Image (cartoon, helix red, strand yellow):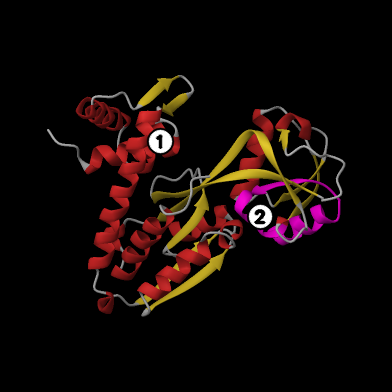
Amino acid sequence: MEITLRQLSCLVAVADHGSISAAAQALDVTQPTVTHQLKLLEDLIGHRLVDRSARGITVRPEGQLVVDRARAILQQITSIADDLVDVRTIHGEVRLGIIQTASAAHFPFVYRRLMTRYPDVHLVVTEARSMDLVEKVRHGDLDLAVVTLPIIYTDLQVAPLWREELVLIDNPSSSVQEEAISLRQLDGLQFIGLDVGTGLQRHVLELFHEYGIQPHLIFQATSIATVIGFVAAGLGISIVPNQTARIYADVGQIVIRHLNPTAFRQLALIYRPLDTMPSAVRVIVHTFINQARRFPRG
């Protein structure tokens, strides 16, 4: 028996998502399928690649070597398929939605690749909240969208993209000097949040609930720029994606403090079944996913 792409895909998904259930959801297969493929791969290689516990999956050092090689192989396979597409036959309008906090970091690089690769595709991009983008894709107002997981609907296809670390941002003149701060230390502090309809704000509120803390929410902004402005003025703290925070920290507007324990959010591409979509939408989906795999995890 030989190692298969399916086995490698299952291993990479488990490593990226930290559990069998999350990997199965990402691959749109059952949990027993992921478990079986992982066991077959371990038997073929002759090493245990992951440790299983009630808290999830931990990749062993020898497993990480296989994960890195598997990821490179899968990227090459996707690139081959991408390169074989005859770009002369791909044209038309594709309507893409994206959450605001994703558009400033990785997305410009994906957009440049798409426009270079498919010059005859007119990509119309709309920024909105996660919950609004999900509804627009479901009702056909958008072809695809980048949103924050999880989503509750099962009638959409979900392709995980990149995972982002969430960090605390503070005023540069703050009396707090620690580079890392416990989530429990945020209890009672003045907090600048985003509208609750954003996936990021829902995720942050879930973190607060999980750790039993209640920061004092003094303002809910509709844009990340407003959040940054309030924090830079010393009016409170906030939690935002690290990639977004670094844009403003590099010019001295804010300082970044890492959270303990580390918190993440997962972004994904959502779309309706591809067999019902025009070829332009299908190639945009495949290229988007391929490009996302090139970004560092976290």
Q: CA distance from mark 2 to mark 1?
A: 26 Å
Figure check: 69 above or below 57: below
Please tell me which residue is depicted at 51% across the width and 62% down the height of the picture: 107
Figure check: 267 above or below 280: above
Q: Is residue 110 magenta?
A: no
Disc 2 crowd rating (10 Å Cα; few below 14, some 14-19, many 20+) is some
Q: In terms of secondary structure, what is the magenta stretch mainly?
A: helix
Q: Secondary structure at mark 1?
A: helix
- Indicate the amino acid at tag 2: Arg
Q: Please give left or right for residue 288 compared with residue 200 in the image.
A: left
State the mark number for residue 246.
Answer: 2
The picture places residue 215, in percent across and down from the top left corner, at 78, 37
Which badge, 2 or 1, comes first in the chain's sequence? 1
Quarter of the image with the N terminus is top left
Q: Please give left or right for residue 129 compared with residue 259 in the image.
A: left
Furthest toward the left, the residue is: 1
Residue 165 visible in image: yes
Q: Please give left or right for residue 258 compared with residue 142 in the image.
A: right
Residue 141 visible in image: no
Q: Quadrant of residue 261?
A: top right
Q: Secondary structure at mark 2?
A: helix
Please tell me which residue is depicted at 56% across the width and 62% down the height of the picture: 103
Q: Which residues are magenta?
A: 223-248
Figure check: 260 above or below 194: above
- Indicate the amino acid at tag 1: Ala
The picture places residue 218, in percent across and down from the top left corner, at 83, 47
State the mark number for residue 15.
Answer: 1
Q: Nearer the viewer, residue 158 or 44?
A: 44
The picture places residue 255, in percent across and down from the top left corner, at 75, 50
Q: Please give left or right for residue 197 compared with residue 47 in the image.
A: right
Please tell me which residue is depicted at 34% across the width and 59% down the height of the picture: 286
The picture places residue 113, in percent across and down from the top left corner, at 42, 69
